[in-house]
């Protein structure tokens, strides 16, 4: 469990891990060395990670033994070097729950807003021994271990030893390795963490909200859209258990994004399914999203607590304490209501209706664009969306109402979804350049919208409550700061729009998406040139 070990590469060895055959023990070493045994130890170890396996895919492992949490590097299924550790009698779920600066700094980037969950628990039986030569000098240390599943070690999964050489006695370590390999030990193989995961039938899997769909330009439009919907619905379903258990706010966030993406692709790529059925599916998706609106609003407000307080001078910050306490109390109630709605038979039925409708086995009625190649159809949609953004942007200035800026934000989101859904059809370099500019523009539009929404929310909170002068000062101060931030962002938005709608960017969009339209598409959709 300790130290850093690498495979045998030369006569000089930094450390060796050997997977043992059966329950082979150190007794065989007594044939050639004087072996001194130490007391056997039993350790129950819990391994932690997030829903997204953020630690694993960052090359780290977090494990706790007793009240001590250890963050180690991950070395091909084995524990590597200890990066940092912290003792706590409490269960630590978020990176912000840790107290030491080293642990917080290490975990923040790997966890983000995700909560830690206990993945697996293993029982480790560890026995240390030292080998001495003929004159009584210690020449090598070994740690013999067996790992079993669960606290009580119900089933032994792996036997292994870790050999720790001493400076000047590397040759003895080589002899020990040779001695054990002749008896079936191997210097390669899955480590204890891999063995525990395999026993628990857990496999680290990359999680993404931007999956690939295996599309080509010739894929039939209905097949393409259906494949997108089915894939994203699976991601939405994966997030539901996390919402019901309220592990962290990202489950709800991602679930809502999935619903929004499905609604968008159905509205953006038109006439792929019968219009009436499409409207019915979008209505169901909208109903599902509305069930979680208030909970998401409260999550956003509470996540912004430190930022909000940091915007005010210290003497005004206590005035916001009551507001956030009210939000936290309301959230407890709203969580129960949301969980009840999501658990209800009616909600499960709606989710199943969507899955059933878009299943490959469902024989859908004919529609105009169902069998058209998706490439020309979608490229037309992308180019029209870009042109619409440019038309709206041309009228945006200092006095433009917030609603118009909001309209641009919505159109940019639709364009991003199209570029994301059909990225496999777009030349890599062009797609990357367009998405980079679009991300920058969207980030500023999002900041603008957030400031607008937050101002309205703060004023609504103040108007609906019985608040004193201190709260009025705090809320008023925060609204003022957000207003000035919003106006500053408006200037940045104008700069980003100018870049996004510039001649050079327009040329990329035109070159990439304004292609000659196939006769089959023209015949099926006579209004395509409009």
Image (cartoon, rainbow, N blue to C red):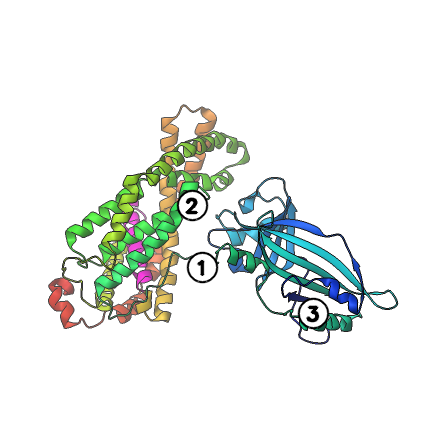
Query: Along the polypeptide, which appears first: circle 3 or circle 1?
Result: 3
Considering only vertical position in the picture, is 456 above or below 146? above
Is residue 428 rendered magenta in the image? no
Residue at numbered disc 1: 206
Image quadrant where one finds the C terminus: bottom left
Of 94 and 173, nearer the camera is 173
Whole-angstrom CA distance, mark 2 to mark 3, is 46 Å
Query: Along the polypeptide, which appears first: circle 2 or circle 3?
Result: 3
**Relative image position of residue 250 (x, y in whole percent):** 43, 47
Residue at numbered disc 2: 242
What numbered label is drawn on residue 112? Answer: none
Residue at numbered disc 3: 180
Whether residues under marks 2 and 3 lie with C-beta atoms below 8 angstroms apart, the answer is no
Is residue 410 rendered magenta in the image? yes
**Relative image position of residue 437 (x, y in whole percent):** 37, 61
Whether residues under marks 3 and 1 lie with C-beta atoms below 8 angstroms apart, the answer is no
What residue appears at the point 57 percent right and 62 percent down from the top-left corner? 77
Considering only vertical position in the picture, is 143 above or below 248? below
User: Can see residue 250?
Assistant: yes
Query: Along the polypeptide, which appears first: circle 2 or circle 1?
Result: 1
Residue at the farthest right position: 135
User: Can see residue 492?
Assistant: no
The answer to whether residue 51 is left or right of residue 91 is: left
Magenta part of the chain? 397-422
Whole-angstrom CA distance, mark 3 to mark 1, is 37 Å
Closer to the observer: label 2 or label 3? 3
Image quadrant where one finds the N terminus: bottom right
Label 2 residue SS: helix
The answer to whether residue 43 is left or right of residue 434 is: right
């Amino acid at each position: 469990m300790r130290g850093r070990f690498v495979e045998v590469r030369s006569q000089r060895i930094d450390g060796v891990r050997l997977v043992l055959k059966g329950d082979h023990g150190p007794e065989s070493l007594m044939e050639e060395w004087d072996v001194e045994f130490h007391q056997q130890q039993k350790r129950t170890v819990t391994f932690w990670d997030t829903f997204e396996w953020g630690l694993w895919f960052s090359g780290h492992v977090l494990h706790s033994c007793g009240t001590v949490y250890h963050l180690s590097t991950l070395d091909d299924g084995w524990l590597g070097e200890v990066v940092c550790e912290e003792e706590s009698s409490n269960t630590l779920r978020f990176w912000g729950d840790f107290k030491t600066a080293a642990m917080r700094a290490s975990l923040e980037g790997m966890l983000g807003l995700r909560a830690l969950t206990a993945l697996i628990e293993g029982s480790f039986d560890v026995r240390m021994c030292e080998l001495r030569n003929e004159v009584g000098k210690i020449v090598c240390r070994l740690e013999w271990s067996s790992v079993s599943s669960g606290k009580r070690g119900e089933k032994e999964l792996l036997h292994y030893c870790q050999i720790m050489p001493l400076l000047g006695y590397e040759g003895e370590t080589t002899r020990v390795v040779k001695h054990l390999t002749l008896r079936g030990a191997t210097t390669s193989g899955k480590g204890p963490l891999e063995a525990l995961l395999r026993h628990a039938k857990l496999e680290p899997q990359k999680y993404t909200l931007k999956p690939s769909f295996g599309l080509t330009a010739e894929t039939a439009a209905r097949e393409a859209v259906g494949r997108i919907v089915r894939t994203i619905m699976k991601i939405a379903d994966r997030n539901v258990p996390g919402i019901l258990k309220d592990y962290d706010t990202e489950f709800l966030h991602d679930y809502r994004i999935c619903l929004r993406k499905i609604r968008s692709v159905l509205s953006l790529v038109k006439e792929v399914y019968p219009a009436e059925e499409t409207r019915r599916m979008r209505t169901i998706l909208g109903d599902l999203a509305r069930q979680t609106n208030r909970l998401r609003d409260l999550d956003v407000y509470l996540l912004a607590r430190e930022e909000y307080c940091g915007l005010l001078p210290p003497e005004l910050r206590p005035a916001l304490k009551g507001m956030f306490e009210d939000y936290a109390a309301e959230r407890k109630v709203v969580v129960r209501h949301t969980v009840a709605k999501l658990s209800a038979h009616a909600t499960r039925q709606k989710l199943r209706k969507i899955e059933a409708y878009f299943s490959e086995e469902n024989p859908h009625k004919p529609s105009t664009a169902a069998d058209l190649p998706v490439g020309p159809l979608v490229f037309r949609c992308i180019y029209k969306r870009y042109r619409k953004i440019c038309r709206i942007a041309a009228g945006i200035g200092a006095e433009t109402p917030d609603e118009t800026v909001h309209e641009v934000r919505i159109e940019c989101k639709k364009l991003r979804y199209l570029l994301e859904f059909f990225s496999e059809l777009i030349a890599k370099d062009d797609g990357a350049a367009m998405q980079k500019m679009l991300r920058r523009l969207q980030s500023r539009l999002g900041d603008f919208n957030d400031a607008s929404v937050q101002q309205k929310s703060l004023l609504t909170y103040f108007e609906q409550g019985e608040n004193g002068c201190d709260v009025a000062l705090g809320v008023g101060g925060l609204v003022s700061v957000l207003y000035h931030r919003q106006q500053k962002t408006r200037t940045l938005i104008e700069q980003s729009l100018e870049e996004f709608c510039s001649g050079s960017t327009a040329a990329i969009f035109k070159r990439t998406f304004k292609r000659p339209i196939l006769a089959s598409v023209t015949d099926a959709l006579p209004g395509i040139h409009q």
